[in-house]
Image: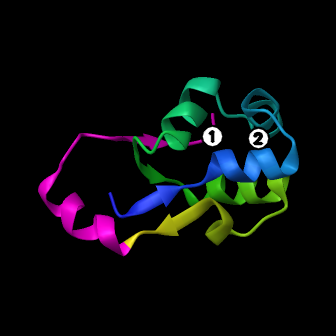
Amino acid sequence: MAIRVTLDRVLLDRRMSLTELGDRVGITLANLSILKTGKAKAIRFSTLEALCRELNCQPGDILVWDPDEAAASDDDEDGGQAVAAE
């Protein structure tokens, strides 16, 4: 997929654990892990907003478009999952 999730970098910059973020936002560790590893195919804007609010960042700090991956993603369908706050 051409969209990469850089959540791990943002968490490191904020000195926050994935567990702490999940508790603050109301997302399970499993769903955050799906998002962090790039296996998610979608994210609700409300979830993205909650992540940005708790991390004090912009959506572009978490999501990055990688043009080199754009062509490869057209050929590779892996059945990713959508991530939403519970």
Name the image quarter holding residue 71: bottom left
Residue visible at 87% across and 42% down? 15
Residue 25: assigned label = 2
Q: Quadrant of the N terminus?
A: bottom left
Tag 2's secondary structure? helix
Residue visible at 64% across and 49% down? 7
Who comes first in sequence, dot 1 or dot 2?
A: 2
Residue range highlighted in magenta: 67-86
Residue 46: give x, y in percent of width and height.
Answer: 64, 56
Q: Quadrant of the C terminus?
A: top right
Please give the residue where the numbered disc 1 appears in the rendered image.
Answer: 85
> Residue 76 colored magenta?
yes
* Label 1: how many Cα within 10 Å (few below 14, some 14–19, many 20+): some
63 vs 9: above or below = below
| Left or right, residue 5 beside residue 22 | left
| Left or right, residue 64 beside residue 42 | right
> Residue 18 colored magenta?
no
